[in-house]
Image (cartoon, grey):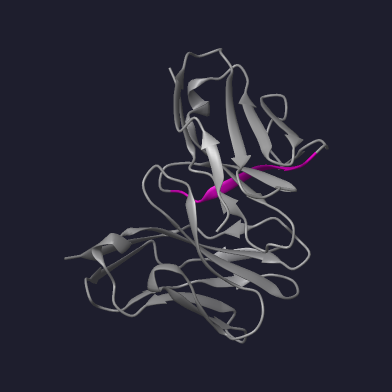
Amino acid sequence: AQSVAQPEDQVNVAEGNPLTVKCTYSVSGNPYLFWYVQYPNRGLQFLLKYITGDNLVKGSYGFEAEFNKSQTSFHLKKPSALVSDSALYFCAVRGSNDYKLSFGAGTTVTVRA
Amino acid sequence: GAVVSQHPSRVICKSGTSVKIECRSLDFQATTMFWYRQFPKKSLMLMATSNEGSKATYEQGVEKDKFLINHASLTLSTLTVTSAHPEDSSFYICSARGGREAEAFFGQGTRLTVV
C-alpha cells in the first residue's frame, strides 16, 4: 500500500522568509511524487513532480522540491514566500505501475505580510 | 499544463433529486479519469476510477448505485449523484490523465449542497 504523511497541519511564515512544507511517503517500487496547491473552493493546481533524474525539482511559481530516497521525503520549498502563496498544499504519491494517487492530509500555509 | 474543466462549479438541489457533474479534458484525451470527494479542511477521498468505454472501478465503501459514473468519450466523464441527501453535500473534484503524462490534472471542483 502507498501512503503520504504531511506532519504539519499548518505552516506560518512571514513574507520574504523561506517556506518549507514537509512530506514523507511510502510506496512499492519507484515513486512518482507530486505537489499540488488548492485555493478556497477550487480544484488542485499542479506545482511540480519527481519521476526520475535530478533530486531537486523546480516547478511553478518559484517552488521547488527535493527528493530524498534514503529519508523517503519530498519536501516542498520556496526561498522567499509571498502572501499570495497562502493556500492548502497537498503532497501525493503513486507507484510507477499504478495510476491512483494517494494524497497527504494537506498543509495549510499562511504567509503574513 | 493540460486543462480540465468541471461543470457546474456550484449546485444546490433538493433532497431526493439527482445531480449531474461533468468533467471535460479540453486539450488532451483522457484515458483515465478520477472522481474525488473532499470534506472541509480534509484531504481528497478517491471515489472511483473510470477508463473510457468501460465500467468505473469504485473504491471500497462508495455506493456505485448512488454515484453513477460514465466515461463515454476520451474527453468527458460524468458523475451523477442520484437521490441526493444532505449528507451528500460536499466538494467533488475530478481529475484526468492521458497518454504518457505522469501527472493528473484537476478540474475546478463542484460544491454540491443538498437542501
- Residue appearing at x 58%, y 54% in the figure: B2
What percent of the width, then of the height, locates residue B109? 49, 40
In the image, is residue B57 part of the stretch drawn in magenta? no
Q: Residue at x 66, y 70 (%)?
A: A32
Looking at the image, residue B99 lies above or below residue B57: below
Instruction: Please state, as top left, top right, bottom left or bottom right, where the N terminus of chain B lies in the image.
Output: bottom right
What segment is highlighted magenta in the picture? B42-52
Residue nearer the viewer, B77 or A10: B77
The overriding secondary structure of the stretch rendered in magenta is strand
- Seen in the image, is A103 located left or right of residue B112? right
**Residue at figure coordinates x 48%, y 22% from the top left:** B86
Q: What's the residue at 53%, 44% (across, down)? A: B107
Whether residue B45 is in magenta: the answer is: yes
Q: In this view of the protein, which residue sits in the foreground, B21 or B36?
A: B21
A57 to B111, vertically: above or below? below
Residue B37 at x, y = what percent?
Answer: 55, 40
Q: Camera-side residue: B95 or A6?
A: B95
